[in-house]
Amino acid sequence: MGFKQRISGVLMPISALPGSPLCGDFGSSAKRFVTFLNRAGQKAWQVLPVNPIDECFSPYASISTFAGDPIYIDLEDLVQTGLLQRSDLAGIPQGPQTQSAFYVAREMKMQRFHKAFANFRRTSGTKYHDAFDRFVDESPWVGPHAAFCALSEKYGTVDWTQWTDEGVKHADQDALQRTLADPELATSVAFHTFLQVMFDVQWSELHEHCRQHGIALIGDIPIYVSKNSVDTWANRQLFQLDSAGHMIRIAGVPADSFNPDGQRWNAPLYDWEAHKADGYSWWLHRIGNVLRRFDMLRLDHFIGFYNYFSMTPQPDENDPGSWIPGPANDFFETVLKAFPDAPLIAEDLGVMNPGVHQLRDTFEFPGINVFQFQFDFRINTDVTAEWKENSLVCTGTHDTNTLAAWFDEVLEDRKKPEPFWDFTFLFDMIKQFMPQDCPVNRETVLWGIVRKVMSSPGNVAVFPMQDLLGLPSSARMNFPGHADGNWTWRLDASFLTDELADRLKQWTAEFGR
């Protein structure tokens, strides 16, 4: 399964799954969603990164690019395996139905994880015991990750440049060995390792459940890592950091359609020469880890591998930033030598120079086409008909407004003296894909857009769940460049109806997916 076949799927973050308290997880709600996808004739489930989210709930700025977020671990499974008692799940609040309550969910689950860990150390024979040694042996990243988590708790911050022990701050092995020998810290390291074992076991089971139902998992690998992460702490030589660990230059982008003033991501830039000298080993381990979890992998901000935007840590009117060449062909030749059949997808959205597309095409990576973007620069041309077969096509992404909200913008734009979009052309193009024998209204127009994208040449079509349901902008997942109010949307379980599944299955079959 992949880009040689015409398939259809749904973009749905794990956190947004309905049914479990406070936040979506790997439990029965995930299994029910897989069943829904199967009934609806879908063959792919795209999710956001499953790394630990940051204080703004973003999965794109994590303390670890290798680890999974324990918030997704299903507590019910811990009861079934005997690590928790049924009474341990009593009194858990349900939280809001259409929003994830991340802070409450994490606090609630951590209390129960500590109970499960105590029982884990006293007992034996569970699937988590069976997996523990194998996982540690196969995951060299988990030791540094668990140590980073334990030390962050000890020093009260994930900003490792603020840690008071200079040797620990600089990841000196002698200092670490001495510090981590403390029994309390050693127990904390073991606990955080246990969390990753549980995450891995449950994720593997969900992945297998998807395989059994014919569903491919599409993952996402953020191009950058957080400054306050185990990745920078343990590998500072691979990043543009000074001797104290502070960022010399940061990542971002110049002005675009999302942010007229550009974006400052406050993420450290890579020292690509250091990566090349090391044979890109950190990247190879990273990609290999994610490929083990997913069947297809979206390379976030693909342009950054061709050239990246370098900015000063603080705004400087004399230095607005500049484009610097990235590792390009050399990097991907190394990656594909290690993973020759890697199903990589180039996230090539936004204004791209020809070199980016040439890099994508040199390695025959599928690109991405978004319906909402296709009419920003061209008028009276059906660009969807020009989309390549070797591409992922969609109505929108986690970064765009919902399709319904976008269409409302088009309707409002129509009233202007000089409208931006050619509404007449757009509507004429869409109406031929509106379901027959249905009245012409806002809902059926949105259905027509979904069907139009389904009909396009792109072999893999993926639709955000919000777009399939016609939800308003309040269901938007993320507004790039805005720190607050993102990532919390959650699906109301009542929306996963048999009617929706039947409609999707019919359309998918109609367009040969």
Image (cartoon, rainbow, N blue to C red):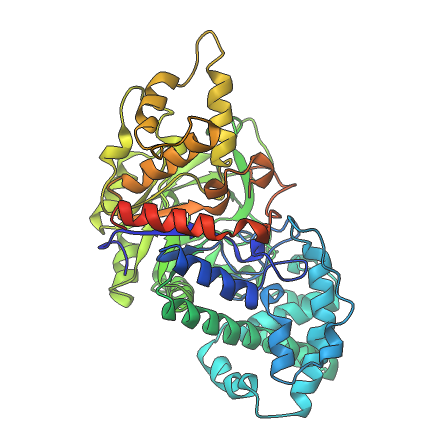
Residue 36 relative to residue 346: left or right: right
**Residue reaching furthest to the top:** 417
Q: Considering the image in quadrants, where does the N terminus appear?
A: bottom left
**How many marks can you see?**
0
Q: Residue at x 65, y 92 (%)?
A: 123
Q: Is residue 432 at least partly visible in the picture?
A: yes
Residue 240 relative to residue 123: left or right: left
Q: State the image coordinates of residue 410 (x, y, percent, origin top left).
A: 46, 22
Q: State the image coordinates of residue 204 (x, y, percent, origin top left).
A: 46, 73
Q: State the image coordinates of residue 212 (x, y, percent, origin top left).
A: 37, 71
**Residue reaching furthest to the front:** 437
Q: Can you say whether 190 is above or below 9 in the image?
A: below
Q: State the image coordinates of residue 351 (x, y, percent, origin top left).
A: 37, 32
Instruction: Please state which of residues 156 and 19 is positioned toward the viewer in this rendering.
Output: 19
Q: Is residue 346 at least partly visible in the picture?
A: no
The quadrant where residue 117 appears: bottom right
Instruction: Please state which of residues 322 and 150 is positioned toward the viewer in this rendering.
Output: 150
Q: Can you say whether 479 is above or below 342 in the image?
A: above
The quadrant where residue 341 appears: bottom left
Q: Can you say whether 66 is above or below 125 in the image?
A: above
Residue 437 relative to residue 32: left or right: left
Q: Residue at x 39, y 40 (%)?
A: 324
